[in-house]
């Protein structure tokens, strides 16, 4: 049975969520939503190589996005504000074009 609007309003979003990267693939690879009041999305790299995480707003050019460094075996964290939404791609450290990466998301509030 679908949740009613009032019931949905009472549901709270988690303060944090973790996206695990293994073999350059994000898991989960769909929508990840956290609370707007200091919500965090952690990216955890299980691989033995570094990656570039590229973030961009939906319906914008992904090649103009912001890049973060995700070290081998390490973590990177993104803070989410109210109404934030970003698509992302997991790319090799020497790759510059999103088409060569493995996408996921969006991450959002």
Image (cartoon, rainbow, N blue to C red):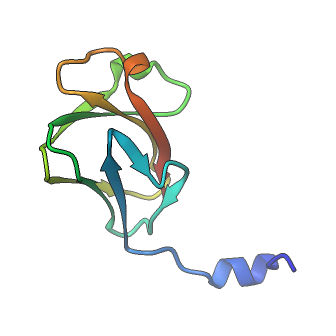
Would residue 108 appear left or right of 55 to someone viewing this image? Answer: right
Q: In this view, does 99 lie above or below 29?
A: above
Q: Nearer the viewer, residue 82 or 64?
A: 64
Where is residue 33 drawn, in percent x and y?
50, 61
Q: Nearer the viewer, residue 25 or 103?
A: 25
Extreme residue in the right direction: 1
Where is residue 68 drawn, in percent x and y?
20, 37
Q: Which of 107 and 60 is in front in this view?
A: 107
- Residue drawn at the location 50% of the way across and 45% of the way down: 106
Tell me the quarter of the image containing the N terminus: bottom right
Write down the quadrant of residue 6 in the picture: bottom right
- Residue drawn at the location 78% of the way across and 76% of the way down: 5
Write down the quadrant of residue 98 in the picture: top left
Where is residue 83 drawn, in percent x and y?
50, 53
Q: Is residue 17 above or below residue 101?
A: below
User: How many marks overall?
Assistant: 0
- Residue drawn at the location 23% of the way across and 53% of the way down: 46
Where is residue 69 drawn, in percent x and y?
16, 38
- Residue drawn at the location 18% of the way across and 26% of the way down: 93
């Amino acid at each position: 049975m679908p949740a009613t609007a009032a019931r949905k309003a009472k549901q709270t979003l988690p303060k944090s969520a973790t996206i695990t990267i293994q073999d350059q693939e994000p898991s989960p690879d769909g929508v990840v939503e956290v609370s707007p009041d200091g919500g965090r999305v952690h990216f955890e790299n299980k691989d033995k190589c570094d990656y570039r995480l590229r973030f961009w707003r939906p319906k914008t050019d992904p090649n103009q996005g912001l890049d973060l460094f995700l070290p081998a075996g390490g973590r990177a964290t993104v803070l989410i504000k109210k109404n934030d939404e970003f698509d992302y791609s997991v790319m090799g450290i020497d790759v510059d074009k999103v088409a060569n990466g493995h996408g996921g998301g969006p991450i959002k509030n």
